[in-house]
Image: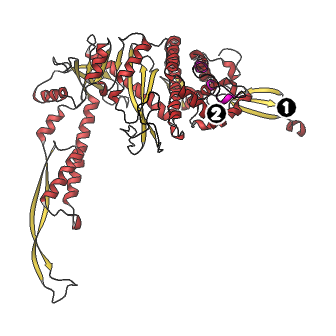
Amino acid sequence: MDDNINSFSLDAREVGAAPIVRRIFERLDLDRLLETYVPGRRFGRKADVSHGRALSVMVANAVLSRQPLYAVPEWLDRHIVQNFGLRDDETKFFNDDRIGRALDRLYEADRASLMTAVVTKAIREFKIDLAQIHNDTTTVTFSGAYEGQKLKAEKKRPPLITFGYNKDHRPDLKQLVYSLTISRDGAVPVHYKTFDGNTTDDQTHIDTWSLIRELAGRPDFTYVADSKLCTRENMAFIAGHGGRFVTVLPRSRGEDDDFRDHIQKNVVLWDEVRREKNPRGKDKPDHVYWAFEPGMRSVEGYRIVWYRSSVKTELDQKRRTKKIARARERLQELENRTGAHRFRSKDAAEKAVQKVLQEEGAERWLTVEVVEETVGDVKQIGPGRPGKDTTYRRVELPVIFIEVADNPETIQADARCDGLFAMVSNVENLTSEGLLGVYKYQPFLEKRNEQLKSVLSVAPMFLKKPERVAALLFVYFLAVLVFALIEREVRNRMAEEGIEELPLYPEERLCEAPTADVVIQAVEGLRCSRLVDANGEVVKVFHDELTPVAKKVLRLLGVDLRAYGVNRKA
C-alpha cells in the first residue's frame, strides 16, 4: 500500500488571475501586435521563444507580480504556463539574458507605432470615449550612477537619467520624467512618454497633445493638465489647432496677484457650484466649492474662473498658522543662544532673523525687531586660576533681544484669499460648475501614476542600460493599461447589471468601485493540482474552489471558468 502511494506525486501550480489578464490580452490582440512590431529572434537562435512572446509574459508578470522582472523564471515555475500562452518546455528559456535581449529588441523597435496600435485596438474593442483627456507627469527615481550616457540630442537615444525636480522628494537621486495621458472614460491610459530627468513639465504638452490628436482623429477633445500647461506657447498651440484646454492658473502669474489684491479690498459675490459629502464621516462638514467669474481675462485673452474650496481654505489656514508658529519657535531659539553661539553684533542677528523668516515664508505675517543692549560684567586680568590676588576689569557686553509681533491686518487680508484657485480655459460653453467638474477628474490620473509606483512596483533600478530602462517603462505602460481595462470592465458591467457593491474586501466587506488589484486578489493563490503516476501520466486534476464573488467577478469580465475547473457558466 505504501509503495502504491509513493508511486504518485502531486504537482500544484497557481492559476490565480492569469486567465483574467489573458482575457484582456485576447481582446487587445496584444500577442499578435507584439509579434508584429517586435519580430524575430536575435543571434540566430532557433530553440527559443520569440521576443513578442517573451514581452507578453513580462507584461503579465508586471500586472500580477510584485517582484522585479529578474524573478520571472521562478514566478513562471509556480504557474500554469498555458495561461500565458506558453508550452511547458518553453519556460526554460526565461532567464536574465532572455529578458534583457527582449528589452533590447523592444527598444530598437518602433515603440510609438506599437503603442498607437495597442491603444487604437483598446479604444475600438472597449469603446473608450476620447472627448476628455487628462495629462500629468511623475518621476521614476534611480539609485545608480548611470554614467557614460549619450548626452547629445541624437534622434534615437534613450532618455537621460539625471537630476531634476524629484516628485518622490529624493533630490539626491537621479530620475526620468514619466508623462502619462488618460481618458476620462475609465481613466484608461492612451499615451505615455519618458523624458530626460531634467525636463520641466511645461515642455511636454505640445508633443503629447499632437499625438493624442492623431490618435483621436480630431482636435476638439478637451485637454486637461496642471499649471505647467498654462504658458503662452502651450495654450496658443492647442487653441490655434482647434483644441480645447483646461488648466490651473499658476500663482506666479500677474492675474493671480491682481485678483488677490482685488478680493482684499472689495466684496466678491461667490456662487456655490459644488457640494460633496465628507468621506471622513457623516458628522463632518461637506466639501463645498464656490465660483466667481470676473470680466477680466488672461493676458492672452482666455477665460479665467475663480474658485474657493472649503477644504483648501482650511488647509491654507493651518499652513499659515503652522508657518507662523514655526518661525516664532526658531526666532526664540536665536534669542536663547549662549556662549560661543551667541550673536556678537546686531547686524549678525538681523541676518539670521531674515533667513528664518524667508525659510519659513513668514515675512508678511510677522514684524521682528532686533534690539541690542549692553550689560556690565567683570573679566579676569591675566591667565590662570582666580585667587586672592587676582584682579578684574569691568567690561560692557552686547545682549541681543528679538521682539516678535503678528501683523494682524496682513494676516486678515491673506485670510480672505484662503482656498482660492483659478482655472484658465478656452472652453466657452461650460458653466463654472461644469469647468470645475472637468478638472475634478485629474486625481484619477494621479491614481494611475500611484499604481505604477506602488501597486505595480516599477523597479527599473535593477537594469543598468538606459535603453533597457526605456523599454521596461513601455512594458509597465502596457501593464497599467491592462490594470485600467480590468477596473473599467468590472465597473461598467456592475452598472449595466445594477450591481451596486461586491464583497471583495477582507471579511466580505462591500466594495462600490473595485480596483484591479482588489479584483486580482479575489482569485489570487487559486491553484490547479495534478496527481501524476510513476509513468508521468496525469491521473486526476484538482482545482481550488472558486468563491461566489470570484465567480461573479470572472463572469463580469467574460473569463472562461474552465481555466478554474468549472465546466459550466457560473
Q: Residue 200 in the image: state x and y as whole percent.
A: 34, 32
What kind of colouring is applied to the model shown? Answer: secondary structure
Disc ID at residue 533? 1
Q: Specify the quadrant of the image occupied by residue 230.
A: top left
Residue 121 vs 20, above or below: the answer is above
Q: Residue at x 18, y 19 (%)?
A: 297
Mark 1 surroundings: few (<14), some (14-19) or many (≥20) residues within 10 A: some
The residue type indicated by label 2 comes to Arg
Nearer the observer: mark 1 or 2; the answer is 2
Q: Closer to the N terminus: mark 1 or mark 2?
A: 2
Mark 2 surroundings: few (<14), some (14-19) or many (≥20) residues within 10 A: some
Q: Nearer the viewer, residue 164 or 57?
A: 164
* Left or right: 543, with 462 as reference point: right
Disc ID at residue 74? none
- The part of the chain drawn in magenta is 33-52
Residue furthest to the bottom: 389
**C-alpha span from label 1 to label 2:** 33 Å
Q: Residue 95 in the image: state x and y as whole percent.
A: 65, 36
Q: Nearer the viewer, residue 536 or 543?
A: 536
The residue type indicated by label 1 comes to Asp
Q: Is residue 195 magenta?
A: no
Q: Secondary structure at mark 1?
A: loop
Q: Residue at x 69, y 32 (%)?
A: 93
* Left or right: 44, with 227 as reference point: right
Disc ID at residue 98? 2
Q: Nearer the viewer, residue 124 or 271?
A: 124
Q: Residue 201 in the image: state x and y as whole percent.
A: 34, 30
